[in-house]
Every structure is written in C-alpha cells, then in structure tokens.
Image (cartoon, rainbow, N blue to C red):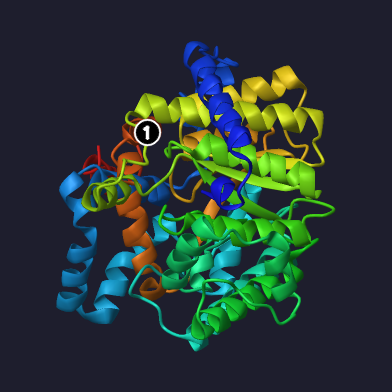
Amino acid sequence: MLCSHLRPSLPHLLSLRLLGTAASRTVAVKQPELLSATLAFEDSGAFRVKSLGELLRALGVFRLCSFPVLVNNCGKLMSIARTLLGRRGFSLLLRPTVYAQFVAGENESEISQSMEKMSSLGLRPMLAVPIEEDLGESTGEKRYDDNMEAMLECVRMSHSNAWCKDPMMQLKITALLSPELCVKLTTVIAQQPYDLDLLIRAMDGETVTFPGLDEKEAAHFLCGLKRLNRISEVSVNKVRVLVDAEYTYMNPALSLVTMAMMKKFNKDGAWIWNTYQCYLKESRSLLLEALRLSRNQGFCLGVKLVRGAYMDKERKLAEKEGRADPVHKSWNDTNDSYNGSLDVMLEVISQKPDGYRIIVATHNEESVRRAAKRMEELGIDKDGGSVCFGQLLGMCDHVSLTLAKEGYAVYKSVPYGSVDDTLPYLVRRAQENRTVLQGIRKERDLLRQELNRRMSSNRNCSGKCKTSTKLAVLFI
C-alpha cells in the first residue's frame, strides 16, 4: 500500500517482495528453542499479585468470552441489556465486570489508581482514548476538534503522572480525520502519489493544493493534518504516539499521513510510530519500504508489530468486491509473517538501536519467546528502550507479568472513559479479537490453579471466606 503509493521503482518493489518471501521461508524452517524455563509461561504464580476479587472477575469474564455466540453477538446483547436495565442499571452491571476487566477507569483519579497498581507490578501503561469512526459515522469538524482535545489530555496524563519512564499512547487517525476522506485519499494516491513534504508543508500552515481532492475534501484534510500536527508537537520529547492501523481500504492514506508525521517529528528519536498488520500478505513489503524510507529521508522508525484484528471483515469485503483475499491463507502463514518481520526489525535494531524501535504487540507466546531469544543473541538490552512488549489490559497477564519479572519493558494497552464512551470500543475489540478471546483457555487454567492454591491454604477460613469459595466454584 504505502510502498506502491510512494512509487518506488518496479524492480525495487519486486526485490522487496522477493526478500519478504525469502524471509518467510527462512522463518518457516527455523523453530526457536525455549529461552528458559522462566519464559515457559506455565507458572500460575504470576497471578499471586491479584486479589481474590480480581481472580473471580477474570475467571467469570473469560468464561463468558469462551462462548462464540456471546462474543459474536455482544453488541446486540449489550444493547438489549441497556434497554431493559436502563442506563444506570446497565452501568451498575457492566462496571464491576467487563468494564473493570478491560478499562482503567472513567476519571483521572480512577485511572491513576489503576496505573499505580500496574506500575507496582513492573508494567507500563499505554493509554488509548476509545474514540474512532468507520464509514458512515463521520460527525463534523467540531467532533474531530473535541477528539483532538481528548488526545491532548491523554498526552498530558501520560506525561505528567510519571507512571513509568518512556510513556506511550495510542492514536486512531480516524478519530481526527473522516474515514470517507481516508478512503478517497487511498484511491487518489494510488494514481497520483503525494510527496511527504507536501503534507509537512500543510502541517506547518502553508497553503497547498492536494491533487485529486475537491475544495471541501482538501479543507477537511488540512484541518485533520493540523490536528495531528498539534498532537505531535505536544507529545515530542514527552510521550511516544503509536498510530493504529485499520482497514486495508484506508490504510494507505493512514500510512502516508503517519510517515509524514515521522519525517517531521522523528529526527532525534522515534516519537511517532506506525502499525504493521502481519496477517496481511503485503505486510513485509510495507515494513521493508518503511525501513528504506527512514534511511533515505533521515528519520527514526517506530514500529508496532501486530498480527491484525480485522480478518473476517477484510475477507468478506474482498469477496464482495471480487478482489483477492488480502489476508494470509493460514494461521501458520501469519505466524511466519510476524516472526519474519520481527527478525528483520531486531536485526536493524542491533545495528542501529537509536534509529529504530519496536513494540512486540502480541499475545502469542512463541513470538514473545522468539523475540526474547533473538534479543539475547543480538545483544539487545532487555530494557534498553529499543524493544518492548505489549498486551491488552485484562488479558494475557501470565505473559505480561512474567516478562516484567524477567526485566523486559512491558506495556499494557489501556482504554479509559465512561461506560457509554468505552462500550463501542469494547464491542469492537471483542469482535475483532474473537480468536484471542476464544483462545484464553490457558490463562483460565492458570487462574484456576491460583484460585485452587488459595482455597487449599484456607480450608479452615471464616464464613466470609467460605462464601468466596462457593462463588469461586461457579467459575471453575
């Protein structure tokens, strides 16, 4: 996408794709050995830091998430529950359960309490404002300006509270720029590539002409670039901003904007990062092209490496439009893609750690172990700043806590806001991560082991403890 829209030469692009294919083949035959027993992620002791209430809540929520019918229809079910219970009743139901499991809180005081506990466990927060839009949801410049203010507040909280060194936050470009324009821009730059400097000049307030856009579209694009510029200016030297990838029908536009932000603001460090979805067949080519751009145009490259979360919709849309499926055919192919891209990034980081950064954003234990093993082989510091790991708040804690205990930098993606504000976010994340949610059997088993350990050590407990034990049985 981005590589084609910035138009490298055809031979160069072909060489990138061949290199990506060759790397995938190499990855497929290399099976990383277990780094150490400590990264086997089999120890339920990682959950000893959790209270009994937290254990019970996690077991209950994960039990619900194991039913596909509930996950697939969670949006409708929550809408029905809200209608029957009313806004207040629905909030009372959701707050101590799903909301408490996956959301940090509503106000700064609640968020701070959650973040301080996380910091005490060696985990770092990566705040995420749960606002985004998809096609047909655009609401006008006022709403986008309000979203910008929310993003600026996120920068302030991330920096001023000093919950961790090297704070991070997530950003959705479609919270600041309409999805419709991103789709239009994707079409335009496929035929008429934009130079990154054109966008940078617009960010600086210069009057520019955007080929292929009408007057209204150009005016909105300019407003969006100014919003992104404002957030970037405030965050540089304070908070690292990780731009999320979205759907393939708008990703080229998002990557173009993100690369322009990188070129402008990443001169002395990786403050703006881009996301690469390894379930896409072209992900390796996009990453290699980003590496080439960063070298040739002299900016630092920050990479958030994910497998991807929009597989079902991408495939259905491709089939509907008669296009080739953009997603890898099998889970193994996606794993090879992820691990191969991971190897590429770790190699360049070992050669120039100040010029590149990566967050290994995955719940996949094999990829986590592979990254740790390669870091050791390449002499990359566990907490040197160039490599870190990331998982979602409320999930995969056995991996996160184990990594933190071993001295690695580990971030948790932390959404925050009211029940109403976070509900669309929670529904989308549940549907987009249904494969992950249905694959949490191991974490549930480890939670059960820790609960059984506590029950065994408290057989002579008081009546209150017996009541808790009876509740625990419901989730086992």
Q: Residues within 10 Å of mark 1 (few under 14, many from 20)?
A: some
Looking at the image, which residue is at 75% across and 80% down? 206
On the image, the x and y values in percent for residue 362 come to 50, 38
Depth check, front residue: 372 or 164: 372
Q: Is residue 211 visible?
A: yes
> Is 35 displayed left or right of 439 in the figure?
right
* Secondary structure at numbered mark 1: loop
Question: The residue under label 1 is which amino acid type?
Answer: His
Q: Is residue 416 visible?
A: no
Looking at the image, which residue is at 52% across and 71% down? 212
Q: Quadrant of the C terminus?
A: top left
Looking at the image, which residue is at 22% across and 74% down? 82
Which residue position is annotated with label 1?
Answer: 328
> Is 360 displayed left or right of 200 in the figure?
left
On the image, the x and y values in percent for residue 9 come to 63, 40
Looking at the image, which residue is at 34% across and 59% down? 428
**336 shown above or below 215:** above
> Is 45 displayed left or right of 96 in the figure?
right
Q: Quadrant of residue 247?
A: bottom left
Q: In this view, which residue lies farthest toward the right?
A: 268
